[in-house]
Amino acid sequence: MKAFGIESGKIAPMLAANIDTDVIMPKQFLKGIDRKGLGKGVFFDQRFLPNGDLNPEFVLNRPQWNGAKFLAVGPNFGCGSSREHAVWGLKQIGIRAVLGTSFGGIFFDNCQRNGLLVLELESSLMLQLGEGVSSGRIKEIEIDLPSQKINLGEGEGIDFDIDSIRKESLIQGLDVIGGTMKLMDSIQKFERRHLMENPWLA
Amino acid sequence: MQTPRTLYDKLIDSHTVCELDGDGHVLLYVDRQVINEYTSPQAFSGLREAGRALRRPESCLAVVDHVNSTEAIRVEVQPDEGGAPQVNYFSKNCADFGIELFDILDSRQGIEHVVAPEQGFILPGMVVAAGDSHTTTYGALGAFGFGIGTSEIEHLLATQTLIYKKLKKMHVIVNRQLGVGVTSKDLIMSVVREIGASGATGYAIEFSGATIDALSVEARMTVCNMAVEAGARGAFIAPDEKVYAYLNNRPKAPGGDCWEAAVKSWTYLKTDEAAVFDREVIIDATTVQPLVTWGTSPDQAVAIDGKVPSPEAQTDPLKRKDIEQALSYMGLEPGTDMAGIAITHAFIGSCTNARIEDLREVAAVVKDRKVADGVRAMIVPGSSEVRVQAQLEGLADIFVDAGFEWRQSGCSMCLAMNDDVLSPGDRCASSTNRNFEGRQGAGVRTHLMSPAMVAAAAINGRLCDVREITEQ
């Protein structure tokens, strides 16, 4: 997993509510057995016209937001299907963080497992940020995860909260499974007792 | 004395291997996992690359459901070539790692969330995770089920645990009786509409009350299944005699003394009287009407005698834009009566509503009637066993006589990952769970509703109140 320290780049607005993982990664891109080629599928029905050309109207195709590393998103972004393909695809087009008020729970966890930073911000802050990004006043930002700060330029900044377990994992780019494997003695001990007390679970 | 606890607290506490921090993260032991062909391949590749073993194959059940064809004649070779690599790799993974697999030709194959309860694989008090958001379904049996992504599947397969953050707790209490022609689908759609598509984000929901008690176990599955459409990462109902009766003698349920001991232990699976929830929602079941969605999010729903809403009524500019966008996609004008909107397709299927009771309700509506001209109507049973049962009961004949396609089991047009895909501009009355843009095919317009309401729409050729048809 790619570590997340201090990252800077363009931020693009996608402020509609309930942008679901079907929209982020349509069904026709789900049939692989690896993670390859999902960059093509991200927001496919919005990003491309029926003839296959780029849709110039789509936010990430506009010159000012093309190549964005961050997305300012509306409430409940990533709701719906559990498909991790949505997160793999976002990573493949270079998205490093999404900023919003609320997120689909499975999407949130999937991002965390893939080193894509999800920041949950207060709705008043998010409203200001969304307006700034949409109007073009805020073009580039810097996210400093170790210091838990977003630098908006011109001396403006936002402090954010994040659970320390998530923060450390992202900063270090940890192999989470490897970490849990170190607890295998506790798992085995728990399991023996659990199955003895509830033999129908064995 | 111990602090009073909710059922959720009890389920999490009894599965906590250890606490990981002071922010509510625990290492959670998972009793069972159900895997499918489309969200698991990269998890197995991860295990292979790291040289890791599968921790507990006997906790795992594998079912092919998302990409398989639902053509009436079932063959091993799938007409949709796109799905074959996943089915083949799934089969190889199950063989290599020693996992029981219900493949396409297995008589127990079906949609994972229909199959797992049907086989008695899910029991009260279990913690269950699966690579599918509708794993919440298992809450109807008093188990705690939740959906996870592929990386989490890999973690689970390797360790039988997940790193889990405890949720807030919501209590949804439903009292009084549902009206005639009003189903548990209408009830859960009302809840989703009431609290919104993210109203339960960060929460686990416990449903209780006289209405819930009166529901069958299958009807409860519909409720728990669709709670995820309000953002809930878990939804459950305390198990009762109905649940025990449902599970008793199922193939994978315990038998004999073990069954007796299990039932005795399950009677403790309930919220303590003085336990505190973070949020409470009270619903009067008599106010629930048959609902249909008008938009592209499951909370955008209205009673069948209602109208398409007007964006003008919304003062928040962002929310107004969302409604405008939804109506533009759906091709609907504000103020239009929902009843009377013409459909091109009717789909009955999915883990939400394709169990035998759902099919019985559909048969009651379509018996001695015909699907309207110009409507393509399909029924995809929730499992191969449901299909056989419906045939034995004579339901399949009723469907075929009425002009429905009677198909094999799978997720099918709920998410249209297989070859059951509609075309741009098609309008489908659907017993499924998501009306997202493009869900049933690019440019396809989906209206969610109960199976009985889909049946009524199929007969009428237009959205209509099922009670008007059945009273004729």
Image (cartoon, coloured by chain):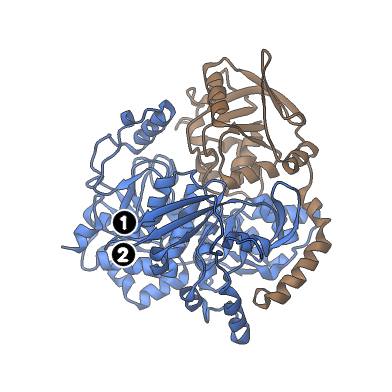
Chain colours: A brown, B blue
Query: Does residue A142 lie above or below B414 as drawn?
Result: above
Q: Which mark is residue B229?
A: none
Counting residues from the start of the chain, the first of labels 1 and 2 encountered is 2
- Residue that mark 1 sits on: B454
Quarter location, residue A126: top right
Residue B44 seen: no
Q: Residue drawn at (34%, 58%), measured in percent from left and top?
A: B285
Q: Residue furthest front?
A: B1
Q: Residue drawn at (43%, 71%), measured in percent from left and top?
A: B386
Q: Chain of mark 1?
A: B
Q: Chain of mark 2?
A: B
Q: Residue drawn at (72%, 65%), measured in percent from left and top?
A: B96
Amino acid residing under circle 1 = Val
Residue B361, how many percent across, how many down?
31, 66
- Report the front residue among B440 and B304: B304
Q: Residue drawn at (37%, 78%), measured in percent from left and top?
A: B392
Quarter location, residue B328: top left
Residue B325, how many percent across, how many down?
39, 32
Mark 2: which secondary structure?
helix
Residue B199, how many percent across, how many down?
48, 45
The answer to whether B228 appears left or right of B154 in the picture is left
